[in-house]
Amino acid sequence: MKALITIAFILTGVVAGKAEAQVWNDSGTWNQQTEDAYAQWVESEVNEDFYLNGKWAGLAHDCADAAYYTRAIFAYENKLPFAMIDPTGSGKTVTNKMTRFNSQSEEKRVRSFLKYIANLSSTKTIGRDTYPVIVNRTYVRPGGIWARPTLMDRGLLDILSGSAGTELPGHAEIIKRIEPTGAIWKLESTVPKAVRALNLTANMWFLPENPQTGLRKWLTPEQYGLPFNQLPGYSLEQFKELGVRASTTTGEGSYPGSSQTTGARTLDQYKTDIAKRLAMNGQTESSQDAVRRIAKSLCGSIRLRNEAVQKAIAFKAKIGERCLSASEYDQFSTPSRDKRARELLKEAMSAISTFGWLSESNIKEISSELNACGPIEVAAGQTITLTDWALAAADDRLSSDPNQSVGARWGLEKAQSTCPTF
């Protein structure tokens, strides 16, 4: 009888222990050594296929999800604590100590936790779980974040018509590595949430204008609630000091040829200032290196466009002959994506030409760099090269309209749909 009681007591203890199981037990702390290890791990191990192959394959993600997953997975694998702001307004944090998934095995618990934080996370929470830092290689490093808030993209027609323009959703990217020239390579996902490859890009699409954007460092669990000025590397210089355009005009009290700041900030100047801050020993990028970098970023951008177009074509096949509604049109059209890709192409042109014209001769001059992207399958058995896309973009043959055929979307045939655009 005593033996039976003992066994029953042990089993009760096991069940009780399982019932209180945390997602994982942390035994380490975030410090300089573990932050260094995190940066090295992101640079060497977190690649485009990180969520397609290996242990963490199959996790659906958008841009914010991928960022949170990466930080949480490293914390789990190294038995470090993880925390994020609870966006429900409780004023608390969501941590690895939660017991919500205690009935599952450890592997399933961790995956359930990752999906749980993905449902809570967004580019808005990233602004609260990270903080802006001074721009140097001590604080801007692999594993950090480049973030953008929700923006409104208003073109001239929007302004003239009084339209609000197109909403550009917030975005977040994981810093992958920093070149000796100061160029920053980042990994990104996109919407909608899906199991997909991460995209490697070195482009910066916007000028950070508030303290929840720009180049950022993750808060550690014990840093929540601390004054910002107590956080290592905290700085607001990205929002007021970097990117201020200098002029060569002279003014009262200045000498001929002196450079004076105008007070206006520009994205181009910001990117120049960032590269200078992060460059090693004053290294700068050659024109050819710049073209290669831009072409690689453009390759990823167009492959993401292809994913969006394929989803639109599949949706059109599903709904039949009818035109897309306004909300469907907004979901499947690609005007902002197409605009940014053209801007990248113009940037590549500017690296080889003073005026950066999108001419056929200029495009063909960099065709070897563009075609390093490889063939892009836009339809079953039909591929294009990045040079093909660039020539179509220069001729204004691409269509952002999701009612159009796949050929029209890629400039391979004339647009024919008479459906309304929104």
Image (tube, helix red, strand yellow):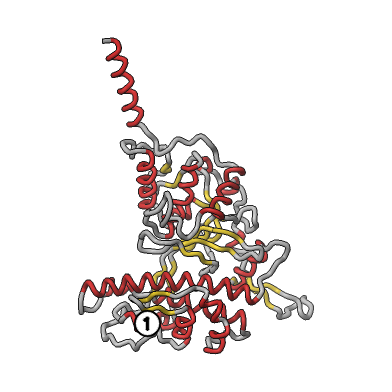
Q: Which of 22 and 255 is in front in this view?
A: 22
Q: Mark 1 points at which residue?
A: 399
In terms of image quadrants, where is residue 317?
bottom left
User: Residue 95 at what x, y percent from top left?
Assistant: 43, 41
Q: Which of 330 and 366 is in front in this view?
A: 366
Q: Residue at 52% of width from left, 66% of height from top?
A: 201
- For the N terminus, the image quarter is top left
* Secondary element type, mark 1: loop
User: Identity of the amino acid at label 1?
Assistant: Ser
Relative vertical location of residue 220 with respect to residue 103 in this rendering, above or below = below
Q: Nearer the viewer, residue 36 or 129?
A: 36
Q: Is residue 315 left or right of residue 113?
A: left
- For the C terminus, the image quarter is bottom left
Q: Is residue 393 left or right of residue 256?
A: left
Relative vertical location of residue 282 with respect to residue 247 in this rendering, above or below = above
User: Residue 319 at what x, y percent from top left?
Assistant: 21, 73
The reply to whether residue 143 is visible in this rendering is: no
Q: Residue at 38% of width from left, 52% of height from top?
A: 118
Q: How crowded is mark 1: few (under 14 residues within 10 Å), some or many (20 or more)?
A: many
The reply to whether residue 177 is visible in this rendering is: yes
User: Residue 365 at what x, y percent from top left?
Assistant: 58, 84
**Furthest-front residue in this view:** 381
Q: Residue at 23% of width from left, 79% of height from top?
A: 323
**Furthest-top residue in this view:** 2
Q: In this view, does 19 lie to the left or right of 65?
A: left
In terms of image quadrants, where is residue 411?
bottom left
